[in-house]
């Protein structure tokens, strides 16, 4: 057994559980929903979101040629998976959920927020709901804080106040809501604004 296989990384169990939950969500979609359903990622269907999160695990090195152009790198990975049938993509997703790469396991603390956010992108886009596990809700909030620094600077203009168990962050006018809703809003998902309280 390779040495790294014997190591348990922080948030590895939570990452595995969230991956399995996302695969279960995808398996529950109709073919039409899977291929062309609405998500909170405006140009991506659920299959594209799934391809993106899988690519982060297996093709991370392919992002290097794009430098800081993360959106272009993400789209290239989605385009790469578009010719795959649903069955093939789901087969790949099962492997991704059950046997994460070493890089995925080691980066679980970072990947959990991205994964949780994209899982919600699919569910919310299709009008579905789920209660997030506590660790995933916190990871989505942290992911939103990080993305906000790059995308829209909201975290520098507002004081975000989670109402479900995290300390407030930032300065300025208050925005209150759940960790999930705040994380999504910080990352530019404006469709959640109705769930937030603006002071």
Image (tube, rainbow, N blue to C red):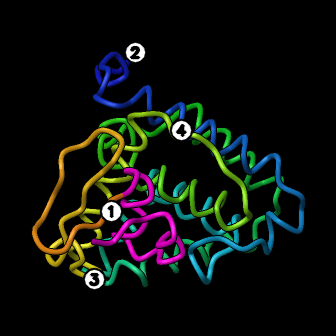
* Nearer to us in this view, 184 or 114: 184
Tell me where residue 144 sits by quadrant. Answer: bottom left
N-terminal-most mark, 1 or 4 = 4
- Residue 43 drawn above or below residue 176: below
- Residue 180, magenta (yes or no): yes
Q: Earlier in the sequence, mark 3 or mark 2?
A: 2
Marks 3 and 2, how far apart in space? 45 Å
Reading the image, the residue beneath label 2 is 1
In this view, the residue in front, 97 or 127, is 127
Q: Which mark is residue 18?
A: 4
Which of pointers 2 and 1 indicates the residue nearer the eye? 1
> Reading the chain from its start, which is encountered first: label 3 or label 1?
1
| Secondary element type, mark 1 | helix
- The residue to which callout 1 is attached is 144
Which circle's residue, 4 or 2, is located before the other in the chain? 2
Q: Earlier in the sequence, mark 2 or mark 1?
A: 2
Give yes or no for contact between labels 2 and 1 (Cβ–Cβ under 8 Å): no
Which secondary structure class fits the magenta region best? helix
Q: Position of residue 40 (x, y in %)?
A: 58, 72
Neighbor class of circle 4 (other Cα within 10 Å; few <14, some 14-19, many 20+) is: many
Query: CA separation, marks 1 and 4?
Result: 17 Å
Q: Residue at x 30, y 51 (%)?
A: 162
Where in the figure is residue 165, as x and y percent of width and height? Answer: 30, 38
Mark 1: few/some/many CA within 10 Å (<14, 14-19, 20+): many
Mark carried by residue 152: 3
Nearest the eye: 161 or 123: 161
Label 3 with label 2: CB-CB less than 8 Å = no
């Amino acid at each position: 057994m390779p040495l790294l296989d014997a190591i348990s990384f922080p948030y590895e169990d939570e990452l595995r559980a969230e991956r399995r939950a996302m695969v279960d969500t995808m398996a529950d979609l109709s073919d039409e929903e899977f291929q062309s359903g609405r998500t909170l990622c405006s140009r991506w269907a659920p299959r594209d979101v799934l391809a993106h999160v899988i690519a982060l695990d297996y093709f991370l090195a392919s992002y290097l040629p794009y430098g800081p152009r993360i959106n272009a790198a993400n789209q290239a990975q989605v385009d790469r998976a578009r010719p795959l049938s649903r069955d093939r993509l789901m087969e790949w997703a099962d492997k991704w959920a059950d046997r994460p790469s070493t890089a995925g396991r080691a980066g679980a603390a970072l990947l959990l927020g991205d994964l949780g956010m994209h899982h919600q992108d699919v569910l919310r886009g299709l009008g579905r709901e789920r209660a997030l596990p506590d660790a995933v809700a916190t990871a989505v909030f942290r992911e939103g804080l990080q993305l906000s620094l790059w995308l829209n600077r909201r975290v520098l203009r507002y004081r975000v106040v989670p109402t479900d168990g995290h300390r407030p962050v930032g300065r300025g006018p208050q925005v209150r809501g759940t960790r999930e809703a705040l994380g999504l809003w910080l990352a530019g998902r404006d469709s959640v604004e109705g769930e937030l309280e603006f002071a």
